[in-house]
Amino acid sequence: MNLKKSLLLVFVVVLLDQSIKIYIKTHFLLGEYVTVFDWFKIYFVENNGMAFGTEFGGKTGKLLLTGFRLVAISGIFYWLYTSIKKKESHLLITAISLIFAGAIGNILDSVFYGRLFSDSFHHVAEFMPENGGYAPWFQGRVVDMFYFPLFEVHIPQKFPFIGGKQFTFFEPVFNLADSAITVGVAILIIFNKKIFSEKQKASIEKEIDKVVDDVDNAIV
């Protein structure tokens, strides 16, 4: 896969992700849902943190997370560019492209949505509201909407801490960007033997050993 095809894949994923998010944001109340099937709902939620609704440390944590995402995106793009330049496997470039697209999709929410939209509490959000958005730059919330409550299990009382509760699988609500990242990582894990040569694996292991040695020396 060349750079143009890779960037086209990234563009399509980001475009679809943002189109879905903007539609949900401007047509649903926060917490509103539509049942597609018993096991699949379109359920509008927002989160301040990481993928699948994970939270991270309030406003300061949010800024740190957004900053980390910006740095990570730069690193992922460099990885993508060098992999294409070295003519690495199609699977590797596809996986990195999906991870890159997913990272961009979620960081757009974090950076811009707070300024571009009004909040979604008790009313449908307005795009470019006259009084400004619901949060400063870099403080936007990520829009999630895909919910797959495949089944519920009642946990017996005998189990400590979680006994007597209902467990829903799959409970986290996510978006297309999360899915792209998950698929990209899954490709790397499942097809690692095809993607990485023995030379590359040895190089990666050498770098990991070097980091471990540096940490050990710092501790000593």
Image: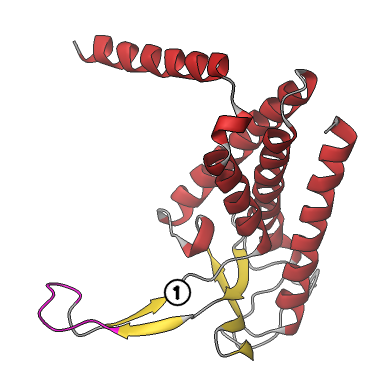
State the residue at coordinates (13%, 84%): 157
Residue 178 in sight: yes
State the residue at coordinates (62%, 62%): 135
Camera-side residue of 203 and 126: 203
Q: Amino acid at mark 1?
A: Glu
Provide the residue span drawn in magenta.
154-162
Which secondary structure lies at badge 1? loop
Q: Quadrant of the N terminus?
A: top right
Q: Position of residue 191 (x, y in %)?
A: 58, 39
Task: Please say which color scheme the image uses.
Answer: secondary structure
Vertical side of 146 occupied by 86: above or below: above
Vertical side of 1 occupied by 125: above or below: below
Camera-side residue of 219 and 175: 175
State the residue at coordinates (54%, 18%): 198
Q: Does residue 24 appear left or right of residue 173 in this picture?
A: right
Kindly indicate the quadrant of the structure image that contains residue 208: top left
Kindly indicate the quadrant of the structure image that contains residue 132: bottom right
Residue 136 in sight: no
